[in-house]
Image (cartoon, helix red, strand yellow):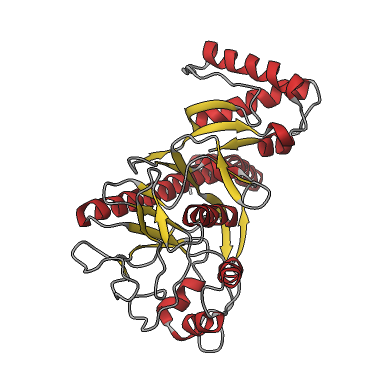
Amino acid sequence: MNPTAQSRSARQAFTLIEMLAVVALIGVMLGIMLPALRGMRRGKLDQMANSQLMADLNTARHMAISGASAVYVVFFPKLSDFHAELQAKGVVDLDAVRTHLQSSRAANDLVGGQLAAYALYTEGTAGDQPVYAPGVINKRYLSEWKSLPDGAFFTTNTLDKIRSMNDLVEKGSPWTYDETGNFFPAPRPRGLENNFAGDLKLALPYIGFGPRGQLVGVPSGMLYWAGARWDTAYRNGYFSVEIAMGSRFAPAKDPAGNNTLDDVDEKEEQLLHSRYNRVRINLLTGRSESNLCDVYWNKGESQVGQKVMEPNAVYVLNQMKALHGLQTSHWPDFNQPMPCMLRDVSVEKARLFENLLLAELRKLGSVSAEALMAELRYE
């Protein structure tokens, strides 16, 4: 070979050291990019779960209006909560429920969908005679059970809140109500699928829509324990559903391939961050809004105290109005037991308020990020 050609070939080749340097550089770049890619995936998953739930709530509302009868979105909670709820009420025979979950493939599949599965259901439609008579067999699911996307779920606290609100509205009766007092039959599915021959009267958590599209079965406001019963305060005309991001691990399978009747094991990516992905529903119209909220301060359980919180919150709100486009005619009344700090704002604005307030309070060494998150309630 021509010596000149050999020299040119040697100059074009890579040495081992150069190759190792390139591999190391690629590794560094991947280390920088992967967190950003995970963040992008999380953002898309947030949007997918939010959009899916909004679409299905709107579908239920449309079906209620077009069918002139209440339609309910029923949720499948964690099994231990589900059984505890049923047992406490004495509503059903738990052995019959377990038999249903073990004998029906459709019902057993839902055991793996705890905290993520929901379906559209009705107790009767226009033209049923009579619609609300207990003996009339017109209960049925209007959709298949579906699940939030993998990596998204409803927290136990969220479904407990919905069921507690249902109980508060029903007040022990077989009826559920909207905000103006119109009543409808409280949903009690016969089973977990339409082919079930018995009647388990399952007290599932639910959000309903009346024939004018209004929200049924949940009142507005903050839920609190009033000494002997649950009650609500600070009514704002909306009800919110939070969606958490994280992992759910389904129960084990038995030798026949069925789900064992155990709880799913769920783990949120970040505790309390489910409030940053929410669907808020107007009680009078039933229309859904994505990621809007009111922000309350739980003054009664605060580590900060009003003398510290009030001037710092006012300073941050003024800063947000001057620099961050906050537009609101509302201003907190710190004489209230749970002052409303922000009203009808985006979750982004609420998080900005939270972060700016935390920065001011940290200058005084007053509160940790976790403690402040627990004190600020998003509704």
Q: Would residue 306 be seen by someone viewing this image from the given angle?
A: yes
Q: Quadrant of residue 377?
A: top right
Q: Residue at x 18, y 65 (%)?
A: 127
Q: Looking at the image, is 319 positioned above or below residue 197?
A: above
Residue 369 rendering spot, x and y as whole percentages: 71, 34
Q: Position of residue 46 (x, y in %)?
A: 47, 46
The reply to whether residue 7 is in sight is no
Expressed as whole percent of the image width and height from the top left, the position of residue 220 reads 48, 41
Residue in the foreground of this view, choosing between 103 and 238: 238
Name of the residue lying farthest toward the bottom: 255
As drawn, 266 above or below 15: below
Examine the image and state in which quarter residue 365 appears: top right
Residue at the outermost left position: 127
Find the residue positioned furthest to the top. Answer: 322
How many numbered callouts?
0
Residue at horizontal 54 percent and vertical 46 percent from the top:
38
Judged left or right of residue 7, residue 267 is right
Compared to residue 276, the image places residue 70 above or below, namely: below
Q: Residue at (64%, 23%) from the top-left corner?
A: 356
Q: Nearer the viewer, residue 347 or 331?
A: 331
Nearer to us in this view, 126 or 55: 126
In the displayed structure, 223 sits above or below 305; it is: below
Q: Nearer the viewer, residue 32 or 195?
A: 195
Query: Residue 283 at x, y = what percent?
Result: 39, 42
The reply, left or right, for residue 129 in relation to residue 226 is left
